Image (cartoon, grey):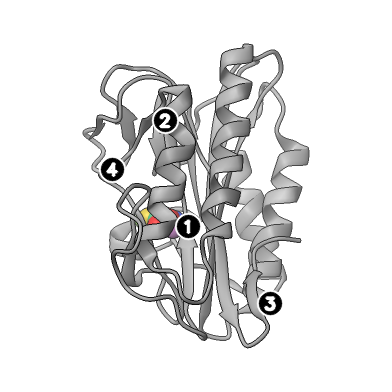
Amino acid sequence: MRRAGKIVGEVLLRLEEELKPGITTGDLDRLAEELIRKAGAVPTFIGYQGYPKSLCTSINEEVVHGIPGPKVINDGDIIGIDCAVTFEGYVADHAKSFAVGAVSKEETDLIDRTRQALMTGIEAFQLGNRIGDIGAAIESFATPYEYGVVRDFVGHGIGRKMHEEPQVPNFGRPGTGARIKTGMVIAIEPMFNLGTHEVEVLQDGWTVVTKDGKKAAHFEHTIAMTEKGPEIITKI
Ligand code: MF3
Ligand code: CO
């Protein structure tokens, strides 16, 4: 799993370098697939419930699960890139949001705080805590900023499959849910909106957008509870 985490971590760093106005989401996807296969890994998303690509690329009001294609990335866009890879049967799942060119302070703050919320959630992944402590930490991080915290999509256990038990919501009550144990591996993935928490799925059956059209950000790490404590396996 560590190898899978390192591969997907490096893929996102490489994609960030390519992220300039004029590039298409399809270009990013092609590069990602090439990098993943060169590393001897497999893009986990391809074929997952019929999903066609290696990445999810979600621009502006798109929250998650945008499908790469001919869409051009413009100056002033914010984009979430989500990718999972399978190496020797184990999966690592990772996502980051980026600002492209000149983006408003409100939007760069949204991106920074969603990243910080992920780190706050990771800090709650401790032996003795419960899964609800993670969601509670993320939700209370968002409260002062009045961001909409997406509820319809959640983090998850991960291992030989991308989605395993338990579900890891980005909201909840402290002291509830499954107890965190050694050997547990989860993906924590807060999605914050500038408007309300409400989202809907577009006609393509995948792309999740905010109902009010306001922008959204998404970050995700895969974290393992090892004998030595928590380890962020998708962090380079
Ligand atoms: N990586 C997403 C998640 O975090 C799932 C993507 S769905 C897929 O759970 F179809 F694109 F694979
Ligand atoms: Co995930």
Q: Is residue 88 left or right of residue 14?
A: left
**Of callouts 1 and 2, the N-terminal one:** 2
- Nearest-to-viewer mark from 1 and 2: 2
- Give the labeled residue for mark 3: 3
| Residues tagged 3 and 2 counted as in contact (Cβ below 8 A) | no
Helix, strand or loop for disc 3 = helix
* Image coords of residue 71 (percent x, y): 50, 27
Where the N terminus falls, by quadrant? Answer: bottom right
Of labels 2 and 4, earlier in sequence is 2
| Mark 1 neighbour density, 10 Å: few (under 14) some (14–19) many (20 or more) | many
For discs 3 and 1, the disc positioned in front in the rendered view: 1
- Drawn side of residue 123 relative to residue 44, left or right: right
Q: Which of the 4 image quarters holds residue 208?
A: top left
The label on residue 96 is none
- Say which amino acid is labelled 3: Arg
> Badge 2, how many Cα within 10 Å: few under 14, some, many 20+?
few
Q: Amino acid at mark 4?
A: Arg
Name the residue beneath numbered marker 1. 188
Q: Which residue is tagged 2?
A: 143
In the rendered image, which residue does mark 4 sit on?
A: 151
* Label 2 vs label 4, nearer the camera: 2
